[in-house]
């Protein structure tokens, strides 16, 4: 096996590792969806949700490392590949198939991320409305008590003073 084929095998292995990482991210997204599905703000396990976010961040860093390594190797052999495409046809087809699979996984991740984001926004908006409603109720009660506990002199204008 020549040096270019070794590099191609490294690139294929990198794509396979990236596929595994993307599948793990999909699992984390599903776990997040389970955390927030049909739940109110107070019922959501926010600690678990945040742990899943941190785990996904670690996986995303791993993808960035893999992408950087892939690009570095590709930059070393791109001229050789361009000159001798036929010699590396099998490896190129393997990489193309893997890249197509990675694209599908990426689309699936984006879709699930968007659904999770929309659900979180809905939960937060509902919580915000409840807080606003509670504040208005508290303010109304406070105003009522203030007006009822005012000194009698303040209400003397309302009493008929004629005898």
Image (spheres, rainbow, N blue to C red):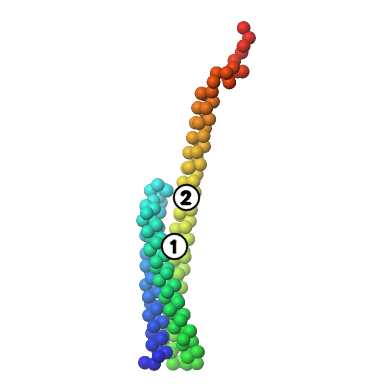
Q: Nearer the viewer, residue 136 or 61?
A: 61
Residue 133: image location, x then y, percent: 50, 39
Q: Quadrant of residue 98?
A: bottom left
Decide if residue 105 is on the left or right side of residue 149. Answer: left
* Total number of numbered discs in the rendering: 2
The residue at 44%/92% (across/down) is 87
Q: Quadrant of residue 33?
A: bottom left
- Distance in Å between CA atoms under marks 2 and 1: 18 Å
Residue 37 visible from this viewpoint: no
Which image quarter holds the N terminus?
bottom left
Q: Residues within 10 Å of mark 2 (few under 14, many from 20)?
A: some
Q: Secondary structure at mark 2?
A: helix
Residue 161 visible from this viewpoint: yes
Vertical comparison of 48 with 90: above or below: above
Question: Which disc number belongs to residue 124?
Answer: 2
Residue 95: image location, x then y, percent: 43, 81
Q: Nearer the viewer, residue 34 or 1?
A: 1
Residue 125: image location, x then y, percent: 49, 49
The residue at 62%/7% (across/down) is 163
Question: Which disc number belongs to residue 149?
Answer: none
Q: Quadrant of residue 57?
A: bottom left
Residue 81: image location, x then y, percent: 47, 89
Residue at label 1? 112
Q: Are marks 2 and 1 in contact (CB under 8 Å)?
A: no
Specify the farthest residue to the right.
162
**Residue depth check, mark 2 versus mark 1: number of the one nearer the observer:** 2
Vertical comparison of 44 with 60: above or below: above
Q: Secondary structure at mark 1?
A: helix
The residue at 44%/79% (across/down) is 70
Q: Residues within 10 Å of mark 1 (few under 14, many from 20)?
A: some
């Amino acid at each position: 096996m020549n040096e270019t084929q070794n590099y191609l095998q490294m690139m294929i292995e990198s794509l396979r590792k990236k596929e595994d990482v993307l599948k793990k991210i999909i699992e984390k997204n599903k776990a997040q969806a389970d955390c927030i599905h049909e739940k109110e703000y107070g019922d959501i396990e926010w600690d678990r949700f945040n742990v899943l976010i941190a785990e996904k961040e670690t996986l995303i860093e791993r993808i960035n490392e893999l992408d950087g390594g892939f690009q570095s190797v590709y930059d070393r052999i791109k001229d050789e590949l361009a000159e001798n495409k036929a010699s590396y046809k099998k490896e190129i087809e393997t990489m193309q198939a893997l890249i197509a699979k990675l694209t599908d996984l990426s689309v699936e991740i984006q879709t699930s991320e968007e659904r999770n984001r929309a659900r979180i926004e809905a939960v937060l908006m509902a919580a915000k409305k409840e807080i606003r409603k509670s504040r208005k109720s508290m303010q109304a009660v406070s105003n009522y008590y203030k007006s009822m506990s005012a000194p009698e002199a303040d209400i003397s204008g309302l009493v008929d003073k004629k005898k």
